Amino acid sequence: MPVESTPTPPRILIVDDDPGQRSLLESFLRSQNFDVVAAGSGERALELLPAGNFSMMISDVRMPGLSGLETLRRVRPQFPALPVLLVTAYADIRDAVIAMRDGALNYLAKPIDLDELLATVRQATGIAPQAPLNLGAEKKLPSEVIAQSPLSRALFQEVSLVAPSEARVLITGESGTGKEVVADVIHGWSARANGPLVKVNCAAIPETLLESELFGHEKGSFTGASAQRIGRFEEADGGTIFLDEILEMSPGLQAKLLRVTQDGRFQRVGSNREIRTNARILAASNRNLEDEVQRGRFREDLFYRLNVVELHLPPLRERREDILPLANFFIGKLARNRARLADGTVVCLQNYSWPGNVRELRNTIERAVLLSQSELILPEHLPAKFRDALKSAVPAAAIEAQQLDEIERQAILAALAQHKFNRTETAKALGISRRALIYKLQRFRQLGLPVD
């Protein structure tokens, strides 16, 4: 009886000088059953191509030495049929369009949308586009992480794909949504889990001291520097550093951080000796950094170095399935499970808009636990603004939510059609991030609403 041979997976050549970006593309495409080879320069790619039997090449545009555009021009005469996908920052899109005239298959804008990347690669290599995204073995979330809603589950599925790579990650979302929790999970699911996780809140440290906090200082380097100090980047060597509220960095400090993202080198304050760190950088902001780049408040080159992958945390009002599990989790911690929510209290919590997100929910439960003299948390144990939610009937609220979902779905479908189903352009037109757009589409599918 003849033995069926296993089809050889398509072989992809990734060309990028950024180790983080290279690592992300390698680990992701391997998780989707592609054979992947990586090159750190255009020159190395030209050496690998002749004997590589590649089905596709994915190249960054801006690289030292041979740029992605020049690499493409040299590849084309020898490999005229090889599909080439360019990865580009928004500032390079004009170059990318020119490159398509030189034979590029397409281009993807940074930060890379993994769904869009996978669809493009499958199409170029002849793999059925309807094949589902392979998320691999499901990782177990830590007990303190609550993810019951479709939006939260989609977020942590993406985290499971990004965490094993060395890619830098920008975590965005409103204050109180749990950006630090996501950083904890990324570190815990990475190969650096046994190394240090160092957290720095850039907004909580005076600007004059932040450089010393990050990079350290030598004795006598400034008034009050009575001893040498090791900086947080040194502490994070071999592990992860989480920079919260990254926008609060001064322009001068942003320039020094850019150097660290490029080659891992920095100097302590008051020293000329270079120090290297092998720390993976996770950054977070509650504001739209792309808008801040346009306003001149944040360096464009640093934005693209930090934003290899963007993970957007939806506000709590958009993932209401998480409200009660979170509330019960906080009750378990604060009241040792000796309290429970009355039905009226549940209605109040579910119908409140939660402008302060998960942080506000925790504070609300802590207050209610303190005020409750019994095992039952009643509506009167909540602030008056929560009790006002009782005036709205639950059926009416449910109908209104369904109507809002339908209005939003129709608006998104219209925008998708207008922009030829390009998610990047659609998200830009809607005024949301691409990640937020993907989460909304996934949420509609979970609700059984057609989105295609």
Image (cartoon, rainbow, N blue to C red):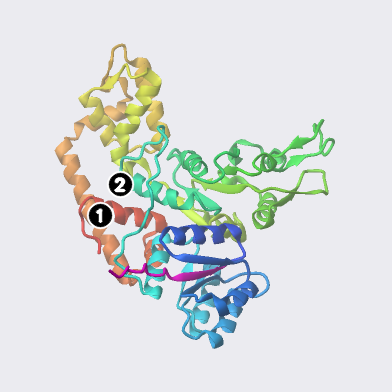
| For residue 123, side relative to residue 25 (left or right) | left
Residue 14 lies in the magenta stretch = yes
- The residue positioned farthest toward the front in the image shown: 1
- The residue positioned farthest toward the top in the image shown: 373
- Number of labels in the image equals 2
- In the rendered view of the protein, which quadrant contains the N terminus? bottom left
Q: Label 1 amino acid? A: Arg
Residue 123 screen position, x and y as percent: 37, 73
Residue 452 screen position, x and y as percent: 25, 64
Q: Nearer the viewer, residue 234 or 354?
A: 234
Cα separation, mark 2 vs mark 1, equals 9 Å
Q: Residue at x 47, y 68 (%)?
A: 108
Q: Quadrant of residue 348?
A: top left
Q: Quadrant of residue 316?
A: top left
What residue did someone put label 2 on? 150
Local SS, label 1 = helix
Residue 368 screen position, x and y as percent: 34, 21
Mark 1 neighbour class, 10 Å CA radius: few under 14, some 14 to 19, many 20 or more: some
| For residue 123, side relative to residue 411 (left or right) | right
Q: Label 2 amino acid? A: Pro
Q: Residue at x 32, y 54 (%)?
A: 440
What residue did someone put label 1 on? 445
Mark 2 neighbour class, 10 Å CA radius: few under 14, some 14 to 19, many 20 or more: many
